[in-house]
Structure formats: C-alpha cells, structure tokens
Amino acid sequence: MQFVFDPAFVVTRQRDKLLRGLSPEARVLNLGSGAKRFGSHVVNLDVEVFGHVDVVGDGQYLPFATEVFDLILCEYVLEHVPSPELMVKEIIRTIKPGGWLYVTIPFMQTFHGNPDDFQRYTTSGLSALFRQLETVECKPYGGPTSALCNMVKEYLAFVFSFNSVFLYSILSQLFILFVFPFKFLDLFLSRSINAHNLSLSLYLIGRKPGRQEEDAENRREAR
C-alpha cells in the first residue's frame, strides 16, 4: 500500500502475489523501474540512471532476447510513451509462453508529466492494447475517491496559484493534506462493479498463451 499521505488508495497485493508465485529461477523485468528493487532475480530497466537500475534503455526497443522473462512489471509507464504500441510489442516478444504481465496505468488522473504524459486507457482499451495476451484481470487500481482527491487537490492548486507555475507545484502537494483522508473510502468503493467507470487508475494481469495453446488457436483459425 502506498504511503499514507498519498491522495491515492492503491493495493499491490495482485502484483506481490505474482512475484511470490514464481520459482526461484524465474526471470523478472521491472520495466520503468525507477529506484524500486523487488529482488536480485528482478532486472530493473529505466531510461535514466537511478539507484538499483541494472539496464539503461528504451522500453520501446528492449535490449533482451525473445521469450526470456517469466514476468514483466510495467507500473505507470505506458502513459509516458509516445508510441505505446511499440512497447507493447516488445513486452509480448520478451515474455515466455505461459509468462505473465502486470501493468498499471492512469484513467481519471490529472496530467503528470515525467517528463511527458500522452494517454489514458479504459478497461476495454487496456485489454485491447494487450489483445495478444489472455486478460486474467483488468480492474481499478486507485478507485473513484482517489480520482476525486486527485482532481480536488489539483483544482485547488490551479485556483489559488494565480497563474504561477512555481506556486502551483507547491500547492498541488500542500493540498494533499486536506484530501488524503477521504481516499480510504476506496477500501470499499473500489470493489463496486461500476468503479472502473471513474477510477483513478487501472491494473491488468495478462498471460501469454503457451505453445500448445497457440498451436490450438492457430488450428482453429485455419479451419
């Protein structure tokens, strides 16, 4: 769970469950890792040099062989990529048959450039983007209240910054103190069947079909 003063209430149990379920020999790629480190078996890749980054590279052109990873983590990265289809193609190429993907992406979230911010996806849009994988789960990650908290603190910063970029950057952090307690409503609200319609962000768990599954699908398409 994220730091208590963050305006978003998110739970990482799905990601952590995937990591725990792998064998000790499994290979994992944390794509766009930043400074996070999940273990010695996880390869951290980022476009910049941070602590714990193992490989500096572009996720749209991954410097790895085909079908080498049992799991790829891609958390809040795709919105920063101008051509996400290229990164998706590389992700699918480097996952082993039967391997897994865990991805998170904003939906009802305000602009957050790092260094830029290009797109948002719905649950159906995210599943379509990874249509070559079996979508195991695609659900809210940061529910409706988190989206509202994010909007309110940004709106207040916008109104009271009086067109100052510097003041806006300060106030957008300061106003978190007024809105963050409400985010805990998402402990319940994010479970609603309608929560994906206005959630802050989404997560998708995908699985790449195994060899036998691919062969069976190809035979069905050939008929």
Image (cartoon, helix red, strand yellow):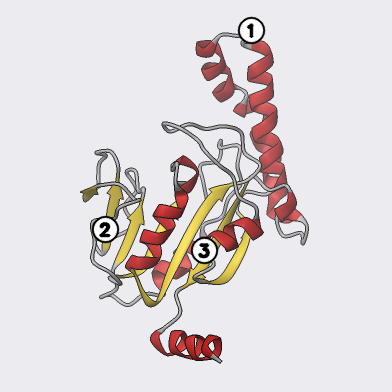
- Provide the secondary structure element on which disc 3 rests: loop
Q: Residues within 10 Å of mark 3 (few under 14, many from 20)?
A: many
Quadrant for the C terminus, please.
Answer: bottom right
Question: Closer to the N terminus: mark 3 or mark 1?
Answer: 3
Measured from the top left, where is residue 103 in percent x and y?
Answer: 49, 57
Q: Which mark is residue 130?
A: 3
Tag 1: amino acid: Phe
Q: Name the residue located 63 percent from the left edge and 46 percent from the top edge.
A: 107
Tag 3 and tag 1, C-beta contact below 8 Å: no
- Provide the secondary structure element on which disc 2 rests: strand
Please give left or right for residue 151 compared with residue 76 in the image: right
Tag 2: amino acid: Val
**Measured along the vertical axis of the image, is residue 151 above or below residue 51?**
above
Question: Closer to the N terminus: mark 2 or mark 3?
Answer: 2
User: Badge 2 is on which residue?
Assistant: 43
Measured from the top left, where is residue 218 in percent x and y?
Answer: 48, 86
Please tell me which residue lies in front, 157 or 131: 131
Please give left or right for residue 200 compared with residue 133 in the image: right
User: Badge 1 is on which residue?
Assistant: 162
